[in-house]
Amino acid sequence: MNTISYTPVPEHIDGQISPIHHPSSLNLVLTRNIVRGEYVHGRLVIDGNFVCHTLENTSSRVPAGIYPISLIKCKQYARKMPCLNAKAPCNMCKKSLNSNPSSLNFVLPCYCPMLKPGNGAHNRLDGSILVGKFNCLGSLIHPKTIFDPLYERIRKSISRGHEVKLTIVDG
């Protein structure tokens, strides 16, 4: 859905205003700048403004490119999460719940790339992009306090009908 803004058009001398359609979108840019061993650190920017640091696992990182973000109900987190390029939930979310809840402890090997809070990417093979504040190599701090406003910004943008994209650039 496009937002309509009204601006006066010079051709109309009698003071009429014409609607001009401006497509609206929220563009997130992730620039990966440190690759050490199994860790990939990056910076997340929205409209040229720094938002937070990111952390990924080297072996399961999402390839560089442009990905639409959609909010999908995740069974692992029991809430909607910002997923990359996902029209359908991951294999975990597609399966019905088993009668034995302890057998559901196989979530991390399921590849489902999304933005999420987290402190470290060691043995995290789900393609997730963790957000937080850089602490040291392979570690983030304050992930929840950084994820919540980022999630709200994405949620509000999607609810207003705007397109949300994540551009991943290898630096």
Image (tube, rainbow, N blue to C red):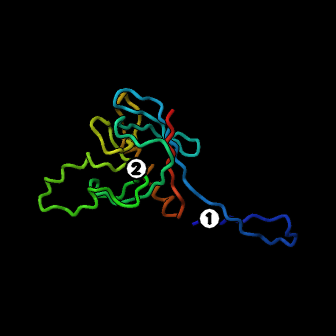
Answer left or right for 75 relative to 149. left
Give the residue at x 48% y 54%.
Answer: 68
Q: Nearer the viewer, residue 168 or 79?
A: 168
**Mark number displayed over residue 155:** none
Is residue 51 at least partly visible in the picture?
no
Q: On the image, numbered disc 2 is attached to which residue?
A: 148
Residues packed near mark 1 inside 10 Å, few (<14), some (14 to 19) or many (20 plus) = some
Q: Amino acid at mark 2?
A: Asp
Give the residue at x 35% y 44%.
Answer: 127
Q: Amino acid at mark 1?
A: Thr
Give the CA separation, mark 1 to mark 2. Answer: 26 Å
Q: Quadrant of the N terminus?
A: bottom right
Q: Helix, strand, or loop for circle 1? A: strand
Give the residue at x 42% y 52%.
Answer: 84
Is residue 37 at least partly visible in the picture?
yes
Compared to 1, does 91 lie above or below?
A: above
Quadrant of res 22: bottom right
Q: Nearer the viewer, residue 144 or 98?
A: 98
Q: On the image, numbered disc 1 is attached to which residue?
A: 3
Residue 81, image x and y in percent? Answer: 37, 55
